[in-house]
Image: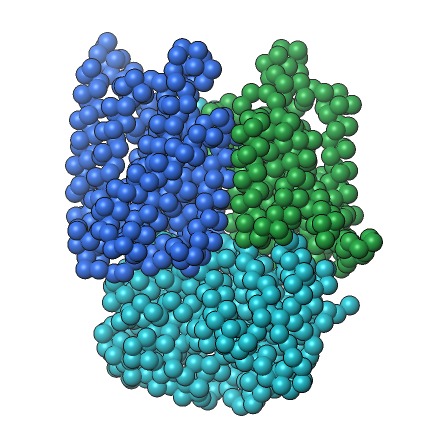
């Protein structure tokens, strides 16, 4: 049983991680705690749904395409809204994402009604047994996707010029700009990539999860805690935090009681942060 | 100093209007909006003490709010204690709770603190959901008594609730006004601006952080009692609702945090918009009312990141400049 | 940039002013009787709220217009005893929140001067909406929230048509008992699974009570957050308990999630009973064939058309309008406007006090209802419907078929439960 619970927890954690990494990247570069991230995952799920309905694109195969669409959307969002609040105080930067979240959720209801939708016949379906452990294929696929995304981000941040520049920004904005780094452009790219991660998350989730306007809220909240747990600004930290949360959720839910599982997640966050005020792997200013 | 006097006179005029307002706006829904405006103005001010002045941004005020609501309700339902005593008890218990919780929390900074408060709100909710003695998820119903000031229940009109909330607001505003000018106020701001420097200057950081949290929580808890008496029903799902926490922060930031007027302005503008758009368009079920609300907040942040107070200050400066020009001419 | 932002600020200000004043210009159409209602039209339960509303709209359509159906108020236009006055609906959105629900109810009652109120769907919300109506002395007819505590408050103006959770929980176990007898099996291990808000908690209380009464052994008693993103832990707990019977009190999203996870983990009880969320068209629409053979608590099924031909005709109308069969949720919300219309018609008045008196004397026969109740007659003290009764349906071939009580069954039930391929 414990093996089953651990497997389930890790898989769930990877799914959370997918949502968390974009959130962490955005924070690291521009210091925005994106409360609208859950809503953006929801939008990506709808995009995935419509692409499946009209051009029968499988959500798993379509993941890169949806990530690309969301990348574009993120850039636009950055140009229209985020850019303008970057210079504002921390509270305004937080408030704006609350506003966006309320707007997107209700826009989805306005455009597509509150009905539940799901994608029938995605290629990743069903379960299989590995020894005595059940594994749900769609979750496994999502987890693999999550690891791929993590690897891509890792590669991008460390091996590409743009990535290195983005890292430079998150370490020291003013120094980076003095060195001739184009902050504006890089901010837009980083924000776009963050939203693209939300896009990938939405697309992979859509392959097995139902879709409705409020679907992203809980994912967004858990992801936020995962990011904080891992330490703001660290994408690896976000993934590790998310996996930890997945394990706490399944193990705690089973042994202590499902009614307490979210309380346990939050409690462990508080305990960890009290001991390590910058999360597991966080750095930089608070 | 003249400026100060003008400020106080303006406040008194506004207070006068606030006292007369429910006599003009008599419709029940209008009065409901007035009650909410007052309640959230107080909640916003309480948030302000903690976040605006002392720099600890909380998105979990619902924890304190709900505890306050439950304290007075438990006293009334289980022990037949008058809600007014419950009202005071709510403030004390919540403040005490906040002090205990605040001890570990005061180690957290910035975003980690903010997300910690979200976590706190969710945890407390779960505790109450699974506590059979207080009704668990079913909550508790407060028996309807004859409407009177003594019973803390008003049925024919809502003005009673309004004036109680207004009274609290006056009390809180006066308190903050004094606090702003006291040693405590300076220490709060010092902690907000730079914790480490403040400590270096000999400010007992933990003590003042705890004070800010306790005062803020106590006031918030008392507001919880007002809402419990207002709807005569407490249930964890509603009293500890995350939306309450978000709305409180929204209102204060929207109005402009870190000064007395901001949260009041925020509540005066935001609550009627939210309520009236719903009344006007909510029945279609299309979510369009909340879309407008969302857009409104985004536009505000984009064009006036300092909140409504930013607009007011700019307008004031412009006026001042014009006057000077006139004087010069 | 500076100029630009000034313009935007002015637009903002104008928008605000507009928003503040538009609602004040309410229209007052004469000769209609206004009744108010409220449902969760936004938020997590929005889809069910919309489903309920379509039932309500259908009811008003039938009352207000003339249709050739053998049903009260169908052939006539409006309320006959008031010169054919039509009912006008004033709708509010509770957002699934108790405070908002109360404010909206008060607003609708006082601003639109409605003479009666109904609806609510979530028990927690109805606690405050019914309180608002009680304070303002407006009759409130509830046909869609089932928490027993609602009618334990001694309210004067509050009436409930639907059977409460106590009766429904009892019926669930009665059905299991009947199945055991018929199949000559002995099912002992019961698991109850409930979403942790007001409604789920009160279902759980009632189920525990009746489980003890009927001698079932409670092997799992699991509560959870209905907004949960994942329920593996819950389902694994169920699996460890290995129950014969599962009773699940759920809203829609959690019903879907549990069904998918239980199938994935191969948790298969012999009898699987779902409530509320399982009735939503979105549920079967989303899980498809996985819903097969789940028993669902309900008060309505299209199969009732066998004994009540008008049920089919009303469903025809409904299908024309909304493109799908009437769901049990829509059907139970459909009932309240008729109970109110009946009371107004007998009272020959739109005064709230007269309507309240008429409601107390309500005596509607089964033939005036599309639901399975034996009629509507309110208990003089609690104001619960003494003739209320619930049905059990089973999802067969993607449709909800009536299978219990056996004398009303349209098709035989299928036993035991098993997951399809």
From this viewpoint, is residue A113 visible? no
Q: Where B243 sits versus C136, above or below?
A: above
Horizontal side of B79 relative to B236 (left or right) equals: left
Relative depth, front residue between A16 and A121: A16
Question: Can residue A268 be seen here?
Answer: yes
Q: Residue furthest right?
A: A131
The quarter of the picture where residue B263 lies is top left
Q: Position of residue B219 (x, y in %)?
A: 31, 37
At a point 53% along the width and 42% down the height, the residue shown is A101
Badge count: 0
Q: Position of residue B284 (x, y in %)?
A: 45, 59
Q: Position of residue B168 (x, y in %)?
A: 24, 38
- Residue placed most toward the observer, A63 or C25: A63
Coloring scheme used: by chain
Q: Is residue A58 above or below residue C352?
A: above
| Chain appearing in blue on the rendered image | B
Apparent colour of chain C: cyan
Residue shown at the point (36%, 57%) measured from the top left: B140
Viewer-side residue, C61 vs A136: A136
Q: Position of residue B87 (x, y in %)?
A: 26, 44
User: C112 left or right of C218?
Assistant: left
From the viewer's perspective, tell me whether residue B99 is left or right of residue B326: right
Chain identifier for the green-coloured part of the image = A
The residue at the point 57 percent across, 67 percent down is C218
Left or right of residue B117: residue C240: right
Residue placed most toward the observer, C40 or B87: B87
Q: Residue at x 74, y 44 (%)?
A: A143
């Amino acid at each position: 049983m414990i093996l089953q619970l651990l497997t389930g927890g890790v898989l769930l954690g990877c799914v959370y991680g997918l949502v968390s990494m974009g959130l962490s990247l955005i924070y690291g570069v521009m210091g925005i705690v994106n409360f609208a991230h859950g809503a953006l995952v929801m939008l990506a799920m709808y995009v995935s749904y419509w692409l499946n309905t009209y051009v029968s694109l499988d959500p798993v195969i379509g993941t890169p395409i949806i990530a690309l669409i969301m990348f574009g959307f993120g850039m636009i969002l950055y140009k229209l809204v985020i850019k303008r609040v970057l210079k504002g105080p921390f509270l305004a930067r937080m408030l704006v994402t609350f506003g966006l979240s309320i707007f997107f959720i209700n826009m989805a209801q306005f455009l597509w009604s509150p009905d539940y939708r799901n994608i029938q016949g995605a290629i990743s379906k069903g379960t299989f047994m590995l020894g005595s452990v059940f594994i749900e294929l769609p979750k496994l696929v999502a987890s693999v996707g999550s690891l791929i995304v993590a690897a891509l981000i890792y590669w991008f941040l460390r091996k590409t010029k743009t990535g290195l520049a983005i890292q430079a920004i998150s370490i020291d904005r003013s120094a980076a700009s003095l060195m001739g780094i184009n902050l504006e452009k890089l901010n837009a790219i980083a924000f776009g990539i963050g939203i693209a991660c939300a896009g990938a998350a939405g697309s992979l989730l859509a392959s097995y999860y139902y879709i409705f306007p409020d679907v992203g809220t809980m994912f967004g909240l858990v992801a936020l805690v995962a990011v904080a747990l891992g330490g703001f600004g660290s994408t690896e930290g976000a993934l590790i935090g998310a996996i930890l949360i997945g394990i706490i959720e399944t193990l705690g839910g089973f042994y202590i009681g499902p009614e307490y599982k979210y309380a346990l997640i939050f409690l462990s966050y508080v305990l960890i942060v009290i001991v390590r005020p910058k999360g597991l792997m966080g750095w930089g200013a608070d | 100093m003249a400026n100060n006097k003008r400020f106080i006179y303006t406040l008194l005029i506004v207070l006068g209007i606030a006292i007369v307002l429910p006599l003009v706006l008599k419709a029940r829904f209008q009065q409901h909006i007035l009650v909410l405006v007052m309640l959230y103005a107080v909640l916003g001010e309480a948030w302000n003490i903690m976040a605006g002045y002392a720099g600890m941004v909380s998105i979990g005020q619902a924890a304190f709010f709900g505890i306050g609501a439950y304290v007075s309700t438990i006293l009334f339902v289980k022990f037949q204690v008058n809600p007014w005593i419950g009202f005071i008890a709510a403030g004390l218990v919540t403040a005490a709770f906040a002090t205990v919780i605040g001890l570990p929390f005061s180690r957290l900074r910035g975003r980690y603190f903010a997300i910690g408060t979200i976590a706190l709100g969710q945890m407390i909710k779960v505790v109450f959901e699974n506590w059979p003695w207080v009704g668990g998820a079913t909550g508790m119903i407060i028996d309807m008594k004859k409407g009177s000031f003594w019973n803390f229940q008003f049925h024919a009109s809502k003005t009673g609730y309004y004036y109680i909330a207004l009274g609290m607001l006056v009390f809180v505003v006066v308190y903050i006004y004094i606090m702003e000018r006291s040693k405590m106020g300076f220490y709060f701001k010092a902690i907000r601006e730079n914790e480490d420097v403040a400590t270096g200057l000999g400010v007992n950081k933990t003590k003042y952080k705890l004070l800010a949290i306790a005062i803020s929580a106590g006031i918030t808890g008392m507001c919880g009692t007002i809402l419990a008496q207002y709807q005569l029903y407490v249930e964890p799902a509603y009293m500890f609702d995350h939306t309450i926490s978000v709305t409180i922060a929204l209102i204060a930031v929207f109005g402009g945090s870190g000064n007395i007027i901001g949260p009041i302005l925020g509540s005066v503008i935001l609550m009627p918009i939210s309520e009236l758009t719903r009344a006007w368009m909510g029945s279609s079920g299309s979510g369009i009312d909340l879309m407008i609300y969302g857009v409104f907040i985004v536009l505000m942040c984009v064009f006036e990141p300092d909140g409504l107070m930013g607009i007011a200050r700019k307008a004031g400066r412009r006026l001042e400049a014009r006057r000077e020009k006139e004087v010069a001419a | 940039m500076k100029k630009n932002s000034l313009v935007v600020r002015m637009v903002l200000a104008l928008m605000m002013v507009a928003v503040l004043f538009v609602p004040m210009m309410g229209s007052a159409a004469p000769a209609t009787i206004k009744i108010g209602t409220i449902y969760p039209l936004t938020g997590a339960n929005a889809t069910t709220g919309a489903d309920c509303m379509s039932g309500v709209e259908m009811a008003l359509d039938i009352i207000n217009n003339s249709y050739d159906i053998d049903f009260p108020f169908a052939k006539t236009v409006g309320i006959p005893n008031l010169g054919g006055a039509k009912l006008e609906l004033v709708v509010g959105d509770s957002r699934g929140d108790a405070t908002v629900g109360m404010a909206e109810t008060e607003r609708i009652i006082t601003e639109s001067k409605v003479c009666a109120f109904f609806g609510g769907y979530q028990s927690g919300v109805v606690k405050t909406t019914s309180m608002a109506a009680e304070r303002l002395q407006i009759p409130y007819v509830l046909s869609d929230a089932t928490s027993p505590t609602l009618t334990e408050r001694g309210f004067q103006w509050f009436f409930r048509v639907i059977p409460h959770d106590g009766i429904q929980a009892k019926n669930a176990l009665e059905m299991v008992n009947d199945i055991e007898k018929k199949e000559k099996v002995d099912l002992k291990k019961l698991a109850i699974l409930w979403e942790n808000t007001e409604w789920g908690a009160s279902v759980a209380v009632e189920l525990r009570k009746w489980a003890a009464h009927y001698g079932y052994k409670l092997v799992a008693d699991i509560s959870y957050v209905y907004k949960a993103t994942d329920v593996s832990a819950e389902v694994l707990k169920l699996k460890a308990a290995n129950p014969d019977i599962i009773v699940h009190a759920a809203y829609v999203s959690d019903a879907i999630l549990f069904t998918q996870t239980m199938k994935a983990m191969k948790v298969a009880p012999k009898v699987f009973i779902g409530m509320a969320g399982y009735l939503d068209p979105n549920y079967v629409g989303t899980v498809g064939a996985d819903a097969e053979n789940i028993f669902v608590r309900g008060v309505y099924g299209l199969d009732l058309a066998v004994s009540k031909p008008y049920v089919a005709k009303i469903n025809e109308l409904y299908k024309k309008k909304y493109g799908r069969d009437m769901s049990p949720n829509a059907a139970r919300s459909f009932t309240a406007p008729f109970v109110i219309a009946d009371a107004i018609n007998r009272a020959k008045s739109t005064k709230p006090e007269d309507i309240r008196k008429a409601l107390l004397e309500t005596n509607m026969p089964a033939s005036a209802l599309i639901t399975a109740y034996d009629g509507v007659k309110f208990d003089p003290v609690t104001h619960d419907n003494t003739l209320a009764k619930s049905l059990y349906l089973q999802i067969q071939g993607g449709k909800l078929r009536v299978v219990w009580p056996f004398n009303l069954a349209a098709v035989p039930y299928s036993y035991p439960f098993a997951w399809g391929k």
